Image (cartoon, coloured by chain):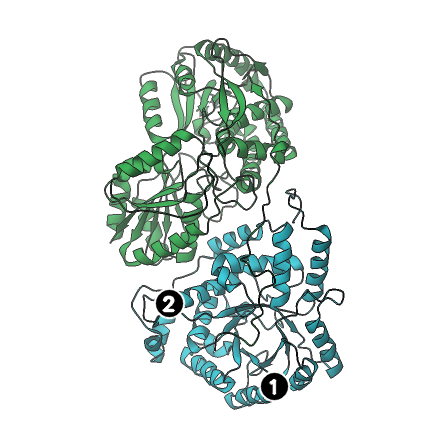
Chain colours: A green, B cyan
Amino acid sequence: MTEGPVDATRPTGSPWDYAPAAVSAARAPLRSSYGLFVDGGHVEPRAGGHTACRDPRDGGVLAEVAVADAADVDAAVRVARRAQPSWAARPGRERARVLLTLAELLERDREAIAVLETLDSGRPIRHTLEDDLPAAADHLVHHAGWADKLAWAGLGAGPTAHGVLAQLTSSRAPLLALIRDLAPALACGNSVVVKPAGCTPLSALLVAELAREAGLPPGVLAVLTGPAATGEALLGHPDLDAVTFRGPAATLRSVRRRLAGRRTALAHGEAGGDIALVFDDAAVDEAVDGIAQAACCNQGPTSWSTSRLLVQERVHDQLLDALRARLEGCRVGDPLDRNTDVGPLVASDHLRALHARMEATGGADAWSASPDLPDTGWWLAPTIVSAEVATTSLAAVADRGPVIGLQSFRTPAEAVAKADAAWLGGTATIWSATGWRGQSVAEHIRARSVWINALPQTGPPDRGLGVTPVTGVGTPHGLEAFLRPTGEVRHGR
Amino acid sequence: MDGSTTQPGGRLTSLAEVTASEARLRTFLTALPPVDPVGLERRAAALARRAVVGSSRHTALEHAITMVDLTTLEGADTPRHVRALAAAARRPDPEDPAAGPVAAVCVYPDLVATAVDALGGSTVGVASVATGFPSGRTSRRVKLLEVQEALAAGAREIDMVLDRGTFLAGGYGRVLEEIRAVKQACGSAHLKVILETGELGGYDEVRRASWLALVAGADFVKTSTGKLAPAATPPAVMVMLAAVRDFAAWTGHVRGVKVAGGLRTADDAVRYLVLCREIAGEPWLRPSRFRLGASSLLEGLVRARRRSASRGHPDHASPAANR
C-alpha cells in the first residue's frame, strides 16, 4: 500500500512551477552609444564608425559601440606606452590600493554590472550576480595582495613588468575573463589595451570607467571595441610587449602564428573547453549535475565549459539516462530571471556554427532536451551528440553552447588516448570516487588543468576551492605570465 | 514494470533476487553508487537560491500546509494538549477555512486514541511512532507489541525507527527482517521508517539505509526523530529523494519521503518543496508522497500564507527580497 490514507487533492490542481522572478533590465547603466575608452575617457573612433551591440534574447539592439581601426589602435598603444613607466614605478602598495578600490566599486555596483553583463552576454543573472561579480572582486583583492610582494613571487628580487600588454578576451563570461587577466597585469605594473570580444563589449567599457574612478591613471587601461579586424590590428601593432588571449582554440593558433618571430610574447593563452571523464565508480548524481552545469550552462558558474564527455562503457546507458533527465530539468529562458539555468547563446554566429557542425556530423545520434524556446533570439536546447567520429570539429564549437559530444571508453588507458587525440588545449575533469584512479589518470592526461570530482574553477588560487588543480599553468599564482624575471633584458628599448 | 530492469549498479537484478539472502542484500547495498559530498552540498546550496516568489510562493505555502504531519512527541504530552493539536490540524488558520487541513497528526502510541477521537470525521490521519522511538533499542517482541497497540487504538500510519545499531554493525539482513515484520503487522496502515540521518555517519550511509528501507517495503523514508541534532538537512533529503526516484524507476513502486526535525520557518518548508520538485520530480509533490513533520512550523506557514494572500501575489521582486 503506497498511497497513505490522506491523498488530498492539491489546492490548485495544476503543476507547481516557479513564477517569473525577473530582475529589471532597467537596472543596467546602459547608454545608447559608446565610444572607445582611451586615455582615461571616451573618445570617438576616427573612421571606423559604430556597430550595433545586440541583445541575445531577441536580437534587438542594446547600444551602438565604436569600431576601432588601425589608427585608433596606434593611438591607444602610444598612450599606454607613455603611461606605463610611471604606473610601474609606483610603489606596489599604491597599485594595490587602486585594485582594492576597484574591487569595492564592483561590490557597490554589483547589481547594475551583473544586469548589464546578462543583457550583453545572455549569461543567467544567477551566475553573473552570485558567481561572477564576487569572483571578479576576489581576483582583484588577491592580486592587489601580490602588487607589493613581487620580490617574493619566485622570479628574483626585482622582476619587472612586461610593459604594454594587449588583452584579447572571450565572449564567455566576459567580465570574469577580463578581470582574470587584468588584475594580475595591472598589479604587476603593466598597462593594458583590452580588445573585448566583438559581441560582448559592454562590461569591459564599464570596468574601464570604474577603474578610472578607482584612481587608475589615465592611459594605463584602454578598451578598444570592434570586430575581429580590430583584434587583428591590435595584434599587428609593433610596439606591444605581450599579449594575453582567451577564446576559441583555432583563434589561439592563429594568434601564436602571428606572434612567431616577434619580440611580443604570448604571456598567457587559454582556449579549449573542458572534457569530462566519468568512470564506473563515479558518484553518478553529482557527476551528472557537474557535467550539466558545466556544459549546458555554457554561461555557467565556470568560464570553462564542458564540451566533451567520455563515459566508461559499463555505466554508459545509466549515465546517459541520468544526464538526459537532468538536462530536461534545466530551465531555459530569460537570463534576467533568477531561476533560469540556461540563457541564449551570445551571438547568432555561434548558433549557426553549432547547427552547421551538428549537421555535418551527419547521422550521429543527437538528443536534445525539449524546453519551450522563445521565437526570437539565439536559443539552443541542451543537446548531447554521440560523436565517436567527429569529435574534434564538434569540440571546437561545442563550447559555445549547451552541446556535449559523447564518447565511451573501456579502460582508463583508452580514455586518456581518446581525450588526448582531440585535445584543443583545454582542461579535464575526472569523475571517480576511487582516489588512486583519479590521480593516475590526472597524471597521464594532456590538459591545462585537471579537476577530480569538481567543477572547473575560476577563482583565484586561494579561493578555498575544496579541490586543487592537479596540474596548472606555470607557478601556482600565474604571475610569471605578467612579469619578466629579474635581470631579463627587454628587447628593442 | 516487474522490477527486473537495470539496477542502479548497472547489473540486471530484480527486487526478489536482491532480498533473497543476506549476501545478496549486502552486495546490492554496497554496490550503490557513491555520493560525492562536495558536489551534493554545492547543488543543495544552489537549489536553496531558487527564487520562489509571488503566486508560486503562495502555491508552495498551500501545498506545504497540506503536507504537514503535525507532531507532538514530548514526555509532557497530555490529552488536552493533543486535542488542541488536533484542532489546529483540522483548521490550521482559524480565520480562513480554505487553508489546509494538514496531512496527519503524529503522537506517541498511548495518545493515539485521544487523537483519533479528536479528529473523528476529518481527513487528517493519525500517525503513531513505535518500535522503541526514538532509540529503537528494545526487543523485537516489544517493538511489534507497540505497533499492534497503536494500530488497535486507531492509528493508520506507523513511524518506526531504523535499528541504527544493527545497521551500523552491518546486520542488514536483520534490519530488513525487522522492517518486514513491522510492515506485516501494519497491514493496510502505511509505514514510515525513520533513518535518523544525523546518526548514520555520512551520505553514503543515508543512501544505503534509504535503499534498505525501500527494498524492505517501507512506504516512506523519514529523516529524523527530531530528538537529535543534526536532524533533517537539505543534502540528506536530496539523497533520499534520489533514492525514491530511482526506486520508482527500477520497480514502478512510488514511495515517499518525510522531512522531520529542524523545520522552523516557512522558507525552510518552501526550500524542501523545491528540492522535492527538482530531485524527485513533480509527481512527488503531494501529501501521499512528501511530508513535513514539525510542530511549530504550521503557525509560520499559516502566517506566511496570510501575508502572501494579502499582498496579492506581486509579480516582480528585487534580488534583495526572498532572502
> Under tag 1, what secondary structure?
loop
Say which of B304 and A491 sits in front.
B304
> Under tag 2, what secondary structure?
helix
Q: Which mark is residue B250?
A: 2
The residue that label 1 is drawn on is: B154
Horizontal side of A40 relative to B79 (left or right) equals left
Horizontal side of B131 relative to A415 (left or right) equals right
Give the residue drawn at x 71%, y 79%.
B82
Lower position in the chain sequence, tag 1 or tag 2: 1
Say which of A457 and A49 sits in front.
A49
How far separated are the C-alphas under marks 1 and 2? Answer: 34 Å
Q: Check disc 1 and give the amino acid type.
A: Gly
Residue B229 image position (x, y, % from top left): 61, 67
Mark 2: give few (<14), some (14-19) or many (20+) Cα within 10 Å.
Answer: many
Q: Check disc 2 and give the amino acid type.
A: Trp
Is any atom of residue A205 visible in this view? Answer: yes
Q: Chain of mark 1?
A: B
Quadrant of residue A143 within the rendered picture? top right
Residue A296 image position (x, y, % from top left): 42, 44
Asked whether the residues under the numbered discs 1 and 2 touch, taking CB atoms below 8 Å apart as contact, a structural biologist would say: no
Give the residue drawn at x 23%, y 42%.
A389
Task: Work out whether A165 lies above or below B155.
Answer: above
